[in-house]
Image: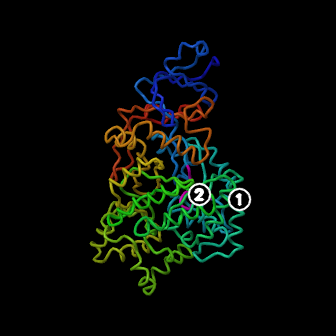
């Protein structure tokens, strides 16, 4: 092996991201790549005798590929070099999820900002005309490699504005052309957000046309489906049919059954996915290891109420007749005490951390009216955490061979969900070490090699000679998080070092 290697990660347990059994050895980093992987019993081989370089003692630690967050909403923050994910061991993030991408900007860029800023936690200054423009900016990030999907909602706004109406054939053709260009420029695929306007207005035929473009160009289609509650099984079957008709690779985003009365539907949904997978459809899903999700408060509304954008929504909420048809269609049902406000536009501290049920009770009204009033008061901008999932269902998702593990982390101006700070330490500490739901090797594969395969990240995701030197070193006996829903912004413990392209960026749990 080449002499003069810059760094030797010595004596750790190598968990290589493939699911293969761990083994003790050294990983050599040189010129941004993995120059050698040397099992401990091969150190005396002649080709390793002249190895030299800085030695980092990794005894007692796991040496793994840098973690890949396969479902992220850090589209803007990755450019701002926010370190919450990096401190978890993440070195690459798939952005542009749930139909929201930061491009292509329409003629009036504010339309796209109004659509996406609730998820992006953005301001009114960003604008990228194309995938190449965005990826060029993202390439300067010091914290992660950005893998970007084209948002279906963003494409719709570019072509037709923020409308949920059926698009014409010419408009769908134009979307297909824009998608083709973005994939040529380096985008990894298409994402849809079918519970968010304007994507909620898409027909299966519109999505099939777009997914055929994805299939021809070897990308992946990820989807935030139309329902995760009463319509869960129908929503899964619709997406499987789209994948079958188009021939595309399908990734079902944050699979779950939300709401106790719907928990039994999850196994039916998984069975449908398994059947299509066995029949040759290239399908997988992802899940986060938490019992609560996070989104914008407007997702609980009938999405037709958002047709035309925020201004039209506010006009409807101010009109008694419009409120009368919106009110009975608001989601939430019997778990309003689990829908908790995490941020609001006017930064009213008295609202953050309180449930919609509690706010409604204080105001002497019902939860549906409280939701409409809050959105009107906050100019349409509020975020929530929603406690609605089952521990047994979570175990089925995290341990399933078709599943990968994600953060789905959303930045907010208030109290963000703890998954933004703590997802992978929670997985490796609580669910692997303590609950023993997964082996360490399988858990690491679900956050490295498996997502790398789904998104064609052939240079990342596995500890192997020649790959990019993205590496996370952690103590398997110490990795954990103290983050909670009430106090989420707590750095994890047990991450010893993180390396990006061969350069140490985290040391002893702090940014280097």
Q: Earlier in the sequence, mark 1 or mark 2?
A: 1
Q: Residue at x 42, y 28 (%)?
A: 61
Furthest-front residue in this view: 279
Whole-Å distance between the Cαs marked 1 and 2? 13 Å
Q: State left or right for residue 191 relative to residue 484.
A: right
Q: Main secondary structure of the magenta part?
A: loop
Q: Which label belongs to residue 180? A: 1
When the figure is inspected, residue 191 is found, relative to residue 407, above or below; the finding is below
> Magenta span has 190?
no
Say how the picture is coloured.
Answer: rainbow
x and y percentages locating residue 250 in the rendered image: 56, 56
Q: Is residue 419 above or below residue 479?
A: below
Place of residue 307 in the rendered image (x, y in percent of width and height, measured from the top left): 55, 76
Residue 477 appears in which quarter of the rendering? top left
Magenta region: which residues? 94-102
Residue 39 image position (x, y, % from top left): 51, 22
Q: Secondary structure at mark 1?
A: helix
> Which image quarter is the N terminus in?
top right
Look at the picture and state if 44 lies above or below 256.
above
Q: Which mark is residue 221?
A: 2
Instruction: Check residue 98 for magenta coloring.
Output: yes
Could you say which is closer to the camera, residue 192 or residue 121?
A: 192
Tell which of 444 and 488 is nearer to you.
444
Residue at horizontal 52 percent and vertical 49 percent from the top? 70
In the rendered view, tell whether residue 473 sits above or below residue 2.
below
């Amino acid at each position: 092996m080449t002499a003069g290697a810059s760094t030797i990660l010595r004596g750790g347990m190598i968990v290589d991201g493939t699911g293969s059994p761990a083994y003790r050895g050294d990983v050599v980093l040189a010129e941004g790549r993995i120059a050698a992987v040397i099992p401990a019993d091969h150190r005396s081989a002649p080709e390793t005798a002249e190895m030299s370089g800085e030695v980092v003692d990794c005894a007692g630690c796991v040496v793994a590929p840098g973690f890949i967050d396969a479902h992220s909403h850090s589209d803007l923050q990755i450019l701002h070099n926010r370190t919450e994910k990096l401190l978890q061991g993440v070195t690459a993030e798939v952005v542009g999820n749930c139909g929201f991408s930061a491009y292509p900007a329409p003629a009036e860029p504010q339309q796209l900002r109004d659509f996406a800023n609730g998820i992006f936690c953005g301001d009114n200054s960003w604008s990228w005309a194309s995938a190449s423009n965005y990826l060029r900016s993202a390439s300067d990030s010091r914290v992660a490699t950005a893998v970007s999907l084209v948002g279906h909602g963003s494409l719709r706004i570019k072509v037709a504005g923020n409308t949920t109406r059926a698009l014409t054939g010419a408009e769908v053709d134009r979307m297909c052309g824009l998608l083709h260009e973005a994939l040529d420029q380096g985008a990894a695929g298409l994402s849809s957000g079918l519970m968010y306007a304007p994507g909620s207005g898409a027909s299966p035929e519109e999505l099939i046309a777009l997914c055929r473009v994805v299939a021809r160009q070897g990308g992946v289609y990820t989807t935030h489906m139309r329902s995760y509650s009463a319509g869960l099984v129908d929503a899964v079957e619709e997406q499987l049919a789209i994948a079958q008709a188009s021939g595309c690779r399908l990734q079902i985003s944050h699979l779950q059954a939300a709401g106790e009365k719907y928990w039994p539907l999850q196994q039916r949904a998984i069975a449908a996915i398994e059947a299509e997978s066995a029949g040759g459809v290239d399908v997988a899903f992802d899940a986060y290891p938490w019992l609560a999700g996070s989104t914008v408060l407007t997702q609980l509304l009938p999405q037709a109420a958002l047709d035309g954008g925020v201004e039209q929504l506010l006009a409807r909420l101010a009109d008694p007749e419009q409120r009368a048809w919106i009110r009975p269609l608001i989601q939430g049902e019997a778990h309003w005490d689990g829908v908790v406000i995490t941020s609001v536009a006017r930064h009213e501290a008295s609202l953050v951390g309180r449930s919609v049920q509690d706010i409604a009770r204080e105001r002497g009204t019902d939860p549906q009216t409280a939701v409409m009033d809050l959105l009107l008061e906050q100019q349409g901008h509020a975020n929530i955490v929603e406690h609605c999932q089952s521990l047994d269902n979570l175990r089925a998702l995290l341990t399933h061979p078709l599943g990968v593990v994600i953060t789905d982390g959303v930045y907010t101006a208030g109290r963000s969900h703890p998954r933004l700070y703590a997802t992978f330490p929670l997985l490796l500490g609580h669910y692997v070490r303590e609950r023993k739901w997964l082996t360490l090797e399988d858990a690491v594969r679900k956050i490295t090699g498996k997502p790398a395969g789904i998104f064609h990240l052939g240079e990342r995701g596995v500890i192997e000679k020649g790959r990019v030197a993205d590496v996370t070193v952690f103590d398997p006996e110490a990795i954990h998080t103290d983050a909670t829903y009430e106090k989420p912004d707590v750095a994890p413990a047990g991450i010893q070092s993180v390396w990006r392209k061969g350069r140490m960026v985290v040391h002893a749990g702090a940014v280097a």
